[in-house]
Image (cartoon, rainbow, N blue to C red):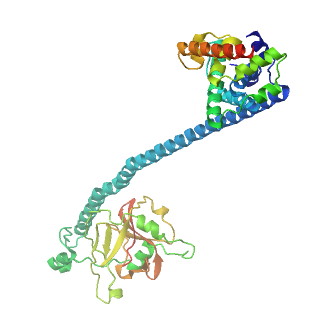
Amino acid sequence: MKTAEEMVSAYENMLYRAALSHTGNCEDAQDMVQETFIRWLTKRPVFESDEHEKAWLLRVVINLCRNYVSKKGNRGNAELLDIYPAADPEEQSLIEDVMSLPAKYRDVIYLFYYEGFSTKEIAEILNTRESTVRSQLLRARNMLKGRLEAEL
Amino acid sequence: MSGYNEYFDKIKLNEEQHQAILDAVKKEEALLSQAAENTKQKSSDTAKIRFMRRAGLIASCAALLALVIIFPLGKRQSMTPANDKIPEADTVMSSDIRSEGADASLSGEKEVRTDAALSPQENIAADPGSIPAPAEEPVASIITDAVIPNTAKSDHAFPEESDRSAAPANEPYECEFAHSIEKSGEETGEEGPVLVEASVSDGLLIFNGKSYRYLEETITDESAFDAGCLAVITVGGDALLDPALLDIRSGMFLYGKEPYDRLYIRLSEDRFLCFVPEDN
C-alpha cells in the first residue's frame, strides 16, 4: 500500500493534465486533483495492478471534473493557454483547436493520444461503451481536421 | 498529434501547487486517522460499557440467585435448633414433673398428682392438702440466688429495637406446660404458697398473666450469662422466681424493681430459653 505522499508524487501531474484538459482552468484542475487524492484516502481501494490504480484515479478525476463543470459551467480555456503557452505558433494553433472541442471529445483525445490507452480501456475509464469511444474519437478527429484545413 | 503531446509534457504542477496538494492530503489523512482512532476508542468504550453492563447484570442475577437459595437455607437452619428444642424441652419438663411427684411420695408426704393435663387449679381442687409445704429455706433467698441483679444498669446496653424485631417473635413454640411455682404468702397477703401457671406457647411465655416474647437464644452454660441482665427461672428445678415480683416496664423486666432485659427459663441442667419483654 502506497503512502499518500508516494501517491501524490506518482500521479499528481497525470491527474492535473487530465483535469486541465477537461476544465481548461488551472485552479479548478488543482482542486480536482486534490479532491481525487482525498477520495483515494477515504476509500483506500485495493488495486490489482499499477494500471488498475492509474485507471481508477483517472476515472475519478474525470468524473469530478464532469460534475464540477456541469455545476459551475465551462469557464473556457483562455487561462490554460495564457499560463502554458505553446512553444511555436503551429503547436499553439493545434492546442487551441483541441481545447475548443467539447469536453467529452477532449477527454478521449487526451486519454487516447497522450496517455496511450486503448479505446477499450478508455471505455472502462469513462464508464461507456467502446463503440462510443471510437465514434467520439472519429468525430474529434474530423472536427480537428476541418478546423486545421480551414486555418490552412 | 506530436505537438499535442509535447505541449502536455510541459504541463506540470509547480512546487507550490505540489506542496499545497500534499499538505491538504496529509491534513486529510491525519483527520481520517484521528476519526478512525476515535471510532476505535468509541467502539472499545462501547464494548467496555456493554461488558460492564453484562457483568453487572450477571452479578445482580448471581446475588439474587444467592439470596433466593441461601436465605431459605439460612432460615431453615435457624429454625432447626428451635424445633429440636421442643421435644427435648417437653421431655425434660415431663420427666421433671414426674420426678417431682416421685420425690414427694418418697418423702412420706401424700402423693401429689402433677399431671400436665390437669391445670394447677384442678390439682388443688383434687387434693387441697397435697399442696407441698413451703420450703424451709425462704423463697426470697432462693430468688436472690436465681436472679442476677443488674449491677451495671448504665453500662449495659439493652437490646436495640431492631434486634428485638429481628427476633423470631412468632416462631412456633408448641411446648405448653404447666408448672407449680411456689409463691410467698407474705408477699401476696395470702396464707401459704399458691400455684402460678407458666406456659410457653407460640413464642410467648405466659407467666403470671403476662406475656414475654421468645428470643431465640439458647445458652448452655449459666456462667455465660451477662451480669445484670438476666433473670433465671428454673423449671422443674429448685430455684424459682417469684412471679409477684416480676413485671414489665418500658420494655424491660422488673424483678424486685431491678431492671433486666432478658429472662431465661431453665429447661434442663444446661439449656435455657431466652425471653425479652413483650411491651404491651
Q: Nearer the viewer, residue B249 or B123?
A: B249
On screen, residue B136 versus residue A69, left or right, reads left
Q: For the C terminus of chain B, which image quadrant?
A: bottom left
**Depth order, front residue of A30/B242:** A30
Where residue A15 sits: x, y (%)?
71, 22
Q: Quadrant of residue A148?
A: top right
Q: Position of residue B260 (x, y in %)?
A: 46, 75
Residue nearer the viewer, A123 or B224: A123
Task: Kindly identify the residue that appears in the image at 83 percent across and 22 percent down.
Answer: A85
* Residue B93, image x, y percentages: 28, 63
Seen from this angle, which residue lies furthest bottom?
B189
Q: Residue at x 33, y 87 (%)?
A: B188
In the picture provided, is A31 more to the left or to the right than B95? right
Up/down of A140 relative to B122, above or below: above
Q: Is residue B11 left or right of residue B198?
A: right
In this view, which residue lies farthest toward the left? B126
Q: Is residue B90 above or below residue B190?
A: above
Q: Is residue B13 above or below residue B86?
A: above
Report the number of discs.
0
Please tell me which residue is depicted at 53% across the width and 40% down the height of the picture: B51
The part of the image, by quadrant, that contains residue B43 is top right
The reply to whether residue B138 is visible in this rendering is no
Q: Position of residue B255 (x, y in %)?
A: 42, 79
Image quarter (top left, top right, bottom left or bottom right) of the N terminus of chain B: top right
From what the image shows, is residue A144 above or below residue B56?
Answer: above
Q: Work out whether residue B170 can be spotted.
A: yes
Tell me which corner region of the image, top left, top right, bottom left or bottom right, holds residue B187. Answer: bottom left
